Amino acid sequence: MNIRDIDHLVLTVTDIPRSLRFYHEVFDLPVVTFDGDRQAVLVGKQKINFQTITEPHQPVADQPTPGSADLCLIAKDSIEDIEHHLRSYFVDIVEGPVERTGAHGKLTSLYVRDPDNNLIEISNYH
């Protein structure tokens, strides 16, 4: 097997329009529509799909739960600009800036929570 990339991930949320608005407005991720009426946000060459517990998209994880995800988004902006941007949207910073190690080296990261309390790390590489 020669797996080398991730195409998409699915977040279980309580309110899809609210999540779309947050990821689009705060993180400036474009919203796309697919499979008729489903919507997601693009993150580079990947996308984040959304589902609710009451309307999961089969097949589904064993126990999809809002607020259980922990993911890292890579930004090109300086960490200071990211922090300023987040504060301008009244997004609370849970932790950071802190030094971390990502898939390709050293990161500087800020941690926030989305509307369902998923932990979102926003980072840039040194």
Image (cartoon, rainbow, N blue to C red):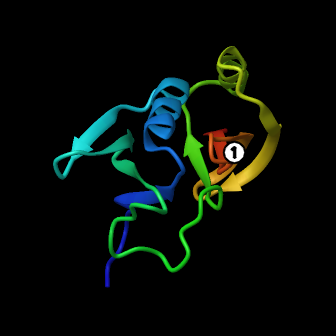
The part of the image, by quadrant, that contains residue 122 is top right
Q: Dot 1: what SS?
A: strand
**Front residue of 37 and 72:** 37
Residue occupying image coordinates x 65% and y 19%: 89
Q: Which residue is mark 1?
A: 107
Task: For the N terminus, give its image quadrant.
Answer: bottom left
Number of disc labels: 1
Q: Position of residue 123 (x, y in %)?
A: 65, 40
Q: Is residue 52 above or below residue 63?
A: above
The part of the image, by quadrant, that contains residue 42 is top left
**Residue count near mark 1 (Cα–Cα under 10 Å), binned few <14, some 14–19, many ≥20:** some
Task: For the C terminus, give its image quadrant.
Answer: top right
Residue at the far left: name it. Answer: 36
Residue at the far bottom: name it. Answer: 1
- Side (left or right) of 67 relative to 98: left
Q: Is residue 48 above or below residue 81?
A: below
- Side (left or right) of 101 relative to 57: right
Residue occupying image coordinates x 21% and y 47%: 34
Q: Position of residue 113 (x, y in %)?
A: 69, 42
Residue occupying image coordinates x 38% and y 63%: 5
Q: Position of residue 125 (x, y in %)?
A: 63, 41
Residue at the far front: name it. Answer: 54
- Side (left or right) of 116 relative to 12: right
**Front residue of 30 and 81:** 30
The residue type indicated by label 1 comes to Leu
**Front residue of 119 and 58:** 58
The part of the image, by quadrant, that contains residue 78 is top right
Q: Position of residue 17 (x, y in %)?
A: 43, 37
